[in-house]
Image (cartoon, rainbow, N blue to C red):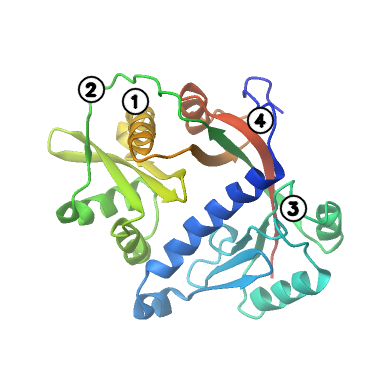
Amino acid sequence: MNASIPQLGSLSSELAIRIEQVEAEMWKQYWSSVSPSQAFELGMHHEVVGSGVALMMEKIPNWFFNRVIGLGIDTAVTLDQIHYLQSLYRNKGLPLGISFSPHAQPSNLPHSLEEMGFENALDWVKMVRGVQAPMEVKTDLRIEPVAPHQWDTATDVLLQGFEMPPMLRPMFASVLGNPQNHIFMMWDGDKAVALGILSLFDGIGHLNSAATLPEYRGRGAQGALMAQRIKHGIELGCELFVTETGYLPDQKNPSLQNMIRNGFELAYMRPNYVVNP
């Protein structure tokens, strides 16, 4: 563990469960927002298995879009469930990823997964903060909430910032119109250059979908967007904020540094176990 990441003093089991549920709900919202015809074109499916949400996207056979979130957080995982998931994804020719919280049960499941051929593809840090005021971020870019007539522009920023294929436009466009989401965008004059979403779930604000055009990185856009979303969430009555990012100990992560500067602390490290078909 990197000693420079401030760590939360304690985390109740109830809060640990809720944190995972929020992320699962956020991704379920992504999948549910797409129209049936668009979902068919992308091969998007999702279903509930135990306490987890299983996401599938056949057109993009990458584990990030084909994984289970929230498994074992309020009901223990059974081997029958794991075998079912393996069969479900294998029959579609897809990798299977399991984002497994250290608070999930049974605690020995990682060992069982490794015996089945799963490998940890990437650790994620789950970060949380309270409702203390965020830092002031200086930037020469302008920040504004996204209006409905700007959704096409916002979708362009997400696709280009994440370097995602155009086929994902329907998914991103649908998410922007969801009333649970509050979207802010950074502008350089009349050019939209960065974006971030705040999703609200029962008093918890989830910061997600933070993207910046490659040529505008390093100019404070994401730090400012994070601070603005926190301020907005506090105004809306959020009691807690949560977010996550990938963690590689030997690589610099600007997203993680923005989280730390904005008062986030480490709730826990979460591995992502993956098995390929």
Residue 114, image quadrant: bottom right
Instruction: Tell me: 31 left or right of 108.
Output: left
Nearest to the eye among marks 2 and 3: give it. 3
Nearest to the eye among marks 1 and 4: give it. 1
Q: Residue at x 35, y 36 (%)?
A: 229
Looking at the rendered structure, the secondary structure element under dot 2 is loop
Does 29 sit above or below residue 133? Answer: below
Residue 17 x, y percent position in the rendering: 65, 50
Numbered badge on residue 25: none
The crowd level at tag 2 (other Cα within 10 Å; few <14, some 14-19, many 20+) is: few
Does 198 sit above or below residue 141? Answer: below
Looking at the rendered structure, the secondary structure element under dot 4 is loop
Give whichever of discs 2 and 3 has the lower sequence position: 3
Inter-mark Cα distance, 1 to 4: 23 Å
Viewer-nearest residue: 236 or 176:
236
Numbered badge on residue 249: 4
Q: Are marks 4 and 3 in contact (CB under 8 Å)?
A: no
The residue beneath circle 2 is 140
Give whichever of discs 2 and 1 has the lower sequence position: 2
Q: Amino acid at mark 1?
A: Gly
The residue beneath circle 1 is 220
Q: Amino acid at mark 4?
A: Pro
Q: Are marks 2 and 1 in contact (CB under 8 Å)?
A: yes
Numbered badge on residue 104: 3
Instruction: Tell me: 173 left or right of 15.
Output: left
Nearest to the eye among marks 2 and 4: give it. 2
Give whichever of discs 4 and 3 has the lower sequence position: 3
Viewer-nearest residue: 238 or 195:
238
